[in-house]
Image (cartoon, grey):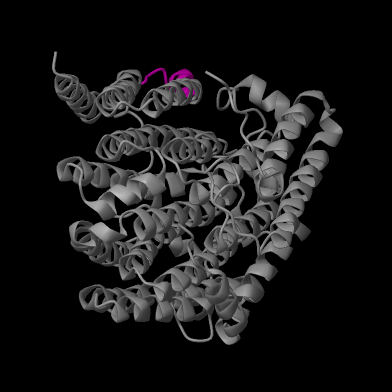
Amino acid sequence: MSFISPTLDYTLLSPILILLGGALIGVLVEAFVSKALRSSTQLTLTIGTLVLSLAQLWKIRNEQSMGAAMGSVVIDGPAILLQASILIIAILSILVIADTDHFTALAAALPGSEQERHSIQTGNQVTEVYPLTLFAISGMMVFPVATDLITLFVALEMLSLPLYLMAGLSRRRRLASQEAALKYFLLGSFSSAFFLFGMAYLYGYSASVSLAGIRESVVGGSGNDVLLLLGMAFISIGLLFKVGAVPFHAWSPDVYQGAPTPITGFMAAATKVAAFGAMLRIYYTVFANAEWSWSPVISMIAIITMLFGSFVALAQRDVKRMLAYSSIAHAGFLLSGVIALNKSGLDASIFYLFAYGVATVGAFAIVTLVRDSSGEVTDLNRWRGLGKRSPWVASAFAGFLLAFAGIPLTSGFIGKFSIFSAAYESGAKGVVFAGVLSSAVAAFFYIRVIVLMFFTDPMQDGTSVEIPSALTRSSIIFSILVTIALGVFPAPLLSFITTLATFIR
Amino acid sequence: MDAANYLYLSALLFSIGAIGVVLRRNAIVVFMCIELMLNAANLSFVTFSRINGDLNGQVVAFFTMVVAACEVVVGLAIIVTIYRSRRSASVDDASLLRR
């Protein structure tokens, strides 16, 4: 048997390879650079890697290929758009993560131990969060472009494993943070086991590990339908878990609350883009011809997710938990783009993912700024009167909330409008009705927070708004500008997405 | 012997693992149940590979083993850290976060 060496198209793969290279160098920097220089070296390296990768992505934006890595990876329009969204969101998140004050000085030390105190006093802050972020980002970049089952599974784990660790790195409330890591890890690997089992059945159904091969079997319809249905069901459980759809959402409020806030923002935004990217690819290309068997179930899940997320968010007293339930509701809105199963659904989903991701990073960046002497204040009651003390920060937060609510002149409105009209076009009227209803409910609690910030008197309890560092500030300013710009002039981006976003099969 | 029997075995192992994750309280045991589920999936892959006469399924099994090993590294690190700070690996004791 002769061995044929694989041919790789390095130009098309370079955005991913650059990230992996940067992450590996980051590990070496962590080991060899002195503690005085470590933090700044890591930050420069990480941002440099991300920018380089984004620049490379821009260069290859018009190239399309199935054969970039022997049919394991496809680079097409949606792939480029999703990867670019992930990179932009990642850059914004890194600017917030760069404020190392949020992270434990030494994750291995016991909370409250002498060792921990010593490493804080001597300024021996480990900065492993940067390489971990880069590894997670490279997994996210591969997940939506993978076209065979092996790559898909490896990418899923590559994006998840670093996130489990990052959830446990908080400096304050370390026990809660470790608990978040444990919950995220156990439930996350539980769902990846389902994903893997579903893959096994799809392989049994089609005798092929490539998505194209499975698609052929689905179109031909010659295989054993039981295997296909089981495979689709289990794969969907894995994906729905990652996007946080009801009934697989139980992890997200706890993890969002316990994880360090910059990580929560990154995770909420970037993981959603990656997971929905993979979901869109799988449902639009592989399962499209079996629509009759999954569309009713996914519609049901979408409706329940939107309503559940919006109604439960009403009862939240904690900012991070409120944003977590709002992200569950948004997962429901995004699912209506999957159900639409038409070109406008794909365009709208990509636009929505980008707009929502940027606003999420911005909103969580603001949560990091509201503090008292013991750390961040996430209790909503203590956010009273924030608008009177710090009008700029409160206005920016109000802007993000209005975008989440889908008020006109923000990116959220355009996103919601286009995604619901795509779903309506495809005849999913029930989903659209539930979507509009839950948007109305959701608007109520977003606006309640705005009222709380601007029209009530501040409490004298030591809650104050930290002066943001230059990096965090630029991240917030950029996010709010994008959020408003996409609401006022969405046309250039929408038409860019429309021309580029077509799956090649 | 009929290869389909291995599929039944794999489904059984997967169910035992899934039930274990839901019922057991010790984080290490929960984690072992997850590993059992991954291995059940591996068994399915190898069986389907035999039934379909296609080697790719066996390749997937190798990749899964490597990924499972990585998962063990990360998972045990998290569980051991929790155990050191709480002196307990029960998933019920970890309940600081609630609504």
Left or right: B1, with A352 as reference point: left
- Farthest-out residue, front: A1
Above or below: residue B36 compared with residue A463? above
Q: Can residue A302 be seen? A: yes
Query: Is A287 situated left or right of A97 in this image?
Result: left
Q: Is residue A314 above or below residue B70?
A: below
Q: Position of residue A229 (x, y in %)?
A: 20, 46
Give the residues drawn in magenta, as a range: B80-89
Q: Residue at x 46, y 40 (%)?
A: A156
Instruction: Please tell me whether residue A398 belongs to the stretch shown in magenta.
Output: no
Residue extending farthest top: B1
Q: Quadrant of residue A116?
A: top right
Question: In this rendering, does residue A100 appear at all?
Answer: no
Q: Residue at x 68, y 49 (%)?
A: A15
Query: B97 or B57, which is in the foreground?
Result: B57
User: Is B37 drawn above or below residue A90 in the view shown?
Assistant: above
Q: What x and y, as percent, mark residue A128?
A: 67, 33
